[in-house]
Image (cartoon, rainbow, N blue to C red):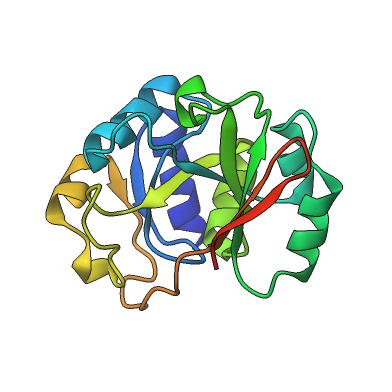
Amino acid sequence: MTEEVNKTYEIVKRGGTIAYPTDTVWGLGCDATNYNSVERVFEIKKRPAEKSMICLVDSLRMLNEYFENVPETAFQILKYADKPTTLILDNAIRVSENVIAPDGSLGVRVVNDAFCKALIRKLKRPLVSTSANISGEPTAKTFSEINPLILEGVDYVVNLHRDRKAAKPSSIIKLSADGAVKVIRQ
């Protein structure tokens, strides 16, 4: 795995895009602080710019570094979550503006996957993560179901877990700065 982390890191560090396994489904991603890389992910996925993407972080500490104020509720939800959970939070900072939703929020997930965690730690920045499918098409449950246009469009396809059937996408919970909590997907 270390060799794959190092190869992938070199690609992402130079502004490249990747297809990679996550703790849920296969992802399409890049350095979340690189505007041009984020634009490339939108292009590869054929996703409208007003539809936001999420970022992956390696820890609660990193989560705190990329939002002005993380509500205490967020930590409670993550502490008791029994499956991967994406939080949509307000006031993201230090990420590319094109990864932030039009309403100023950003989806973020603390990953458990060993590869993702190691890559993010080495990069020292969040990683964009959106499902590795063309916008509007079904999410691929296995590597072999990924549209070839996605695989041809990225700079690197991680050579791990290609035989693994994906877990379900994460739960999504929106926590607004005013304290409102909304479950978007369970």
Horizontal placement of 180 versus 13: left or right?
right
Residue at (31, 77) in percent of width and height: 163
Vertical order, 112 against 154 (above or below) = below
Residue at (45, 24) in percent of width and height: 98
Q: Position of residue 100 (x, y in %)?
A: 52, 29
Horizontal placement of 158 versus 120: left or right?
left
Q: Position of residue 129 (x, y in %)?
A: 45, 47
Tell how many labels: 0
> Which of these two is toward me, 55 or 51?
51
Horizontal placement of 122 versus 143: left or right?
right
> Which of these two is toward me, 151 or 14?
151
Q: Position of residue 47 (x, y in %)?
A: 28, 38
> Which of these two is toward me, 79 or 150?
79
- On the image, which quarter does residue 106 sit in? top right
- On the image, which quarter does residue 173 sit in? bottom right
Residue at (35, 33) in percent of width and height: 16
Q: Position of residue 74 (x, y in %)?
A: 77, 52
Instruction: Name the quarter where the C terminus is drawn.
Output: bottom right
Residue at (21, 56) in percent of width and height: 137
Vertical order, 82 against 1 (above or below) = below
- On the image, which quarter does residue 123 sit in? top right
